[in-house]
Image: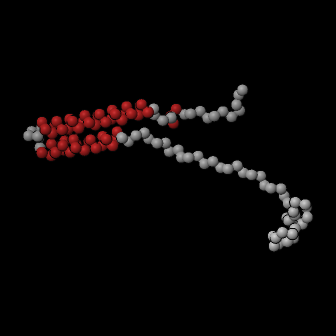
Amino acid sequence: MSRRTPDPAQSITSAPEPLGADQARRARRYLVQMGIRVVCFLLAALLWAHVPLWVSLTLIVGAVVLPYTAVLFANAGRERQAVGPVAVLPPSLPAGPAGTGDARDHRGERDDRTDGGPR
């Protein structure tokens, strides 16, 4: 049996990245940044007496700051989609029967009392 209104197809460009690929990408980024940190630290220690002081201090600052940024980027997690909650509207009820505007009780008699008490 065919449906007259098919569901819209999911666009591959709007599909989120798989969890395993996201974790692998973040792990690679972390390892690259930590590798750069090790290189900065080793160069600062090995070149301390052979280069100007500002070069060694720059390498040391890089070795100190990179772990902080590496952890921030590694723990950033998956990007969230900007899709918010979908509002569900209540169904609209049809209008009541058109009346004559006068108040009649269940027997069809007109009720002209305004006190609302029993008869």
Residue at 9% across, 39% down: 50
* Residue 98 image point, x, y percent: 84, 58
Q: Furthest residue to the front?
A: 118
Q: Furthest residue to the top?
A: 1
* Residue 56 image point, x, y percent: 15, 42
In the drawing, does residue 16 fall left or right of residue 111? left
Query: Which part of the image, by quadrant, shows the N terminus?
Result: top right
Residue at 26% across, 36% down: 34
Query: Which part of the image, by quadrant, shows the C terminus?
Result: bottom right
Q: Furthest residue to the bottom?
A: 115
* Residue 118 image point, x, y percent: 84, 69
Q: Which quadrant of the view contains residue 57?
A: top left
In the drawing, does residue 96 fall left or right of residue 32? right
Q: How is the image coloured?
A: secondary structure
* Residue 67 image point, x, y percent: 26, 41
In the drawing, does residue 51 fall left or right of residue 71? left
In the drawing, does residue 62 fall left or right of residue 99? left
Residue at 36% across, 35% down: 26
Q: Furthest residue to the left?
A: 49
Of residues 31 and 12, the one nearer the viewer is: 31
Q: Which quadrant of the view contains residue 11?
A: top right
Q: How many marks?
A: 0
Of residues 82 and 113, the one nearer the viewer is: 113
